[in-house]
Amino acid sequence: MDTPTLSELEAQAVRERPVFGEGAHILCDNLVRIFKTEGVEVVALQGLDLLIEKGELIAMVGASGSGKSTLLNVLSGLDVPTAGVARVAGVDLLSMTAKDRLRYRRETVGFIWQQTARNLIPYLTARENVSLPMRLAGNRAPRSRADELLELLEVSYCADRRPGEMSGGEQQRVAIAVALANSPEVVLADEPTGELDSESSEEVFAALRKANRELGVTAVIVTHDELVSERVDRTIGIRDGRTSSETLRRTSEDGGTVAREYAVLDRVGRLQLPRDFMSSLNMERRVRLELEHDHIGVWPEGSNDEPSEDGR
């Protein structure tokens, strides 16, 4: 019997390691995605950790190139991770066959593109667009389900219209109905309000919130739209291929909204300090840490190289 190599032993150790957040509806543990472009490797996701519970409505934000769209493509089954763990509704995204991936995209997740033209077939009516994924899945009563979804999202009056006869906001609400057609566990939306005015954006976000609350579907929205990112209970920031921050919101006693931003600490103790904090204090390669009784102090290199009185 051949002796396992060091790399094989390391891979086995990773597979056998307890999974972070085992029971979450969407789970990423040390997720890595590497692209090769003209012989150059680009690491789009650098050991990303993420937990989303069933029924959550969350927004995902980050600068261009931060990795948020890559993450959405992985979760939707459009892209395959390089390493780590990625699971959605109990489905392991790294071990799927091509047939499994097709079934996953048809039944488990619904996807909404930013570009309205990508979501709908132009020569079909709204009802026919919503019915199509159900017909492909073998649903024998797609028309009634399509009409129910169009009614839920308040675009039933568009049932017999083709996309060219609808506004951008109406098209996106019909696109949400298409994404919900086969009763998916999760809906993923990539900048769904990016091409819309503020009024239409409000209507599209209201439709996503309604689907989340009334159908219980977990919804993840990648967005730059503050109207969206500031009106969900949790906003996740992505930076340099990792989750960097989370903003949690709750309703105060007077009916207002209280928001607090947290840095995200990953499994090995890494966190990303906000860039403006680092620039303000000239923090670059090294920082000094001190453990206090109720917090950890972080100082720029050279601020005070002497140990504290308690010896730390």
Image (tube, helix red, strand yellow):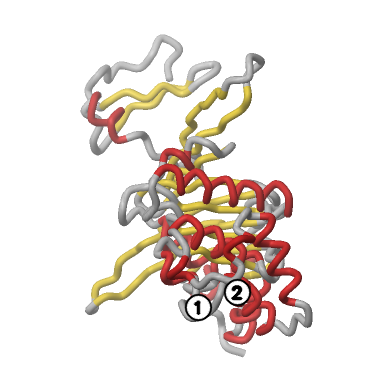
Amino acid bearing label 2: Arg
Image x and y of residue 192, in percent? 46, 56
Within 10 Å of the Cα at label 2, are there few (<14), some (14-19), or many (20+) other Cα atoms? some
For the residue pair 255 and 159, the one nearer the viewer reads as: 159
Regarding residue 31, the answer to whether it shows in the image is no
Which element carries disc 2, helix, strand or loop? helix
Residue at x-position 56% and y-position 57%: 28
Image x and y of residue 142, in percent? 72, 76
Residue at x-position 46% and y-position 77%: 122
Total tally of numbered discs in the picture = 2
**In the orientation shown, which residue stands out farthest toward the bottom?**
1
**Residue at which label 1 appears:** 5
For the residue pair 206 and 303, the one nearer the viewer reads as: 206
Separation of marks 2 and 1 at Cα, in angstroms: 36 Å
Residue at x-position 59% and y-position 51%: 208
| Marking on residue 210 | none
Residue at x-position 51% and y-position 58%: 170
Relative horizontal placement of residue 42, taking residue 132 as reference (left or right): left
Image x and y of residue 224, in percent? 38, 46
Image x and y of residue 228, in percent? 48, 42
| Marking on residue 105 | 2
Quarter of the rendering containing residue 68: bottom left
**In the orientation shown, which residue stands out farthest toward the top?**
309
Regarding residue 299, the answer to whether it shows in the image is yes
Quarter of the rendering containing residue 289: top left
Which element carries disc 1, helix, strand or loop? loop
The N terminus, quarter of image: bottom right
Amino acid bearing label 1: Thr
